[in-house]
Amino acid sequence: MRLLIVGDLDGHITTAGKIAMDRGAKVAHAASIADALNALRGGRGADLVMVDVKLAVQDLCDALVAERIHVPVVACGIGSDARAAVRAIHAGAKEYVPLPPDAEMIAAVLEAVAEESHAILTQDPGMQRLMRVAEQVARSDASVLIVGESGTGKELFARFLHRKSRRSDRPFISVNCAAIPENLLESELFGHEKGAFTGAIARRIGKFEEASGGTLLLDEVTEMEPRLQAKLLRAIQEQEIDRVGGSRPVKVDLRVLATTNRALEDEVRAGNFREDLYFRLNVMTLALPPLRERPVDIELLALHFMQRYAAANGLGTKSLHPDTLAMLRAHTWRGNVRELENTLHRAVVLSPGPVIEPDAVMLMDTAPTLGGPAAGAANRAAAAVSALDSQDVAGTAGLVGRTVADVERDLIIDTLHHTLGNRTHAANILGISIRTLRNKLKQYHEEGVAVPMPGEPERAYL
């Protein structure tokens, strides 16, 4: 949770910030409405803006709408000033909080925003049963292993467990073990002392200490090297860690959750994952079903993503054509909910009218031709795909004269473009580990090849 406080809150800014930080929020401050907007425009995002009611709340809310910056606003003012509260709500604030700040009220506002941002939408009976089990498990401090294919929402479930736990008012810290190089992951998790290695110019607190009192999520834990797995096992068992370069252990108090998209039993048998760590993490397992096994949720999620991205792009209300909905229901969704979200995001942007027609939907294993204003580069790219498909008739003739390394590089780069730069999703599609993919991309970058970054659109849409 990232909180941006705007104004001085009549001198209560320090108290409000401390309460929020004690609840696990990262707090930033802006002195004025202009400073706040500059911070949001400059990429210093926020999940919630808390603004002094004496400032121009209307101007802030109008600017956020005009610039399509989607962040909830809460106004704050001295005492229970009913007129100030009404003005703030009419201006666009979601809530009015009286000052001096009350710890329980601040916690409730942060919780409400977090729940709205990370809600799990489902009508599937199996998923609903799983959520009821998760709510029961959340009350304990037992480690939980969340397994499922890439894109099924494992991190959302981890956040759900934290929100329903006794530690909900404490920090929730997530570490993506697949995204951090091995030589940095140890310091990221356990911290380091000044001078522990070249470049360690100051002590650094690791994620274990940062999450103390709350919950630590180890995302894609199977990507961790075996050497670090032994240190992780000790940290979980003893509830104490050793900073890199440290001389004495540091006590911590946290709950550990872990996610993986691999079959951990297979990884244990292959010698890639420690069996004792597997049993330590696997006190309780929650297995998330792929989207293809919960077809009743496809329409619900599609409508949700369609509304979200139509609003985010200032495109007004849109609806799904019945044939479009039938196409979505028939698709296999190898990338699960993440793939559905990306598909609807593209369709919203490419659809020329208020109704999303089937031609505006570009699925993983199809390359439809778009009509109207959405045509152009996308049609040319689809035609290129069709031309490549025609080469299949001649087998691999189109690849003769090219090296295996060249073909592999193009396949990896094209897959990354397709996944909008998402490394984990791309590695899943390619059938390789995230570590192998990361090493390949590092090599390509050093060779001067343009490597897609997360969030970059597919080349078909440029």
Image: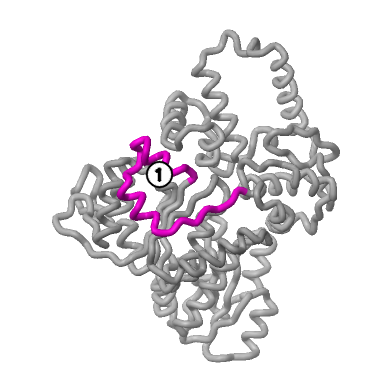
Could you say which quadrant of the image residue 335 lies in?
Answer: top right
Q: Residue at x 45, y 23 (%)?
A: 447
- Picture layout, residue 133 above or below residue 166: above
- Picture layout, residue 18 above or below residue 357: below
Q: Position of residue 452 (x, y in %)?
A: 54, 35
State the residue in front, 221 or 10.
Answer: 221
User: Amino acid under label 1?
Assistant: Thr
Q: Residue at x 49, y 62 (%)?
A: 159
Say which residue label 1 marks: 222
Quadrant (top left, top right, bottom left, bottom right) of the C terminus: top right
Q: Residue at x 45, y 35 (%)?
A: 433
Q: Residue at x 40, y 39 (%)?
A: 267
In this rendering, position of residue 275 left or right of residue 158: left
Label 1 SS: helix
Could you say which quadrant of the image residue 366 lies in?
Answer: top right
- Picture layout, residue 341 above or below residue 284: above
Q: Position of residue 413 (x, y in %)?
A: 55, 29
Q: Is residue 437 visible?
A: yes
Q: What range of the chain is rendered magenta?
A: 261-290
Q: Position of residue 398 (x, y in %)?
A: 65, 12
In this rendering, position of residue 199 left or right of residue 97: left
Q: Is residue 462 visible?
A: no
- Picture layout, residue 324 above or below residue 119: above
Q: Position of residue 110 (x, y in %)?
A: 51, 72
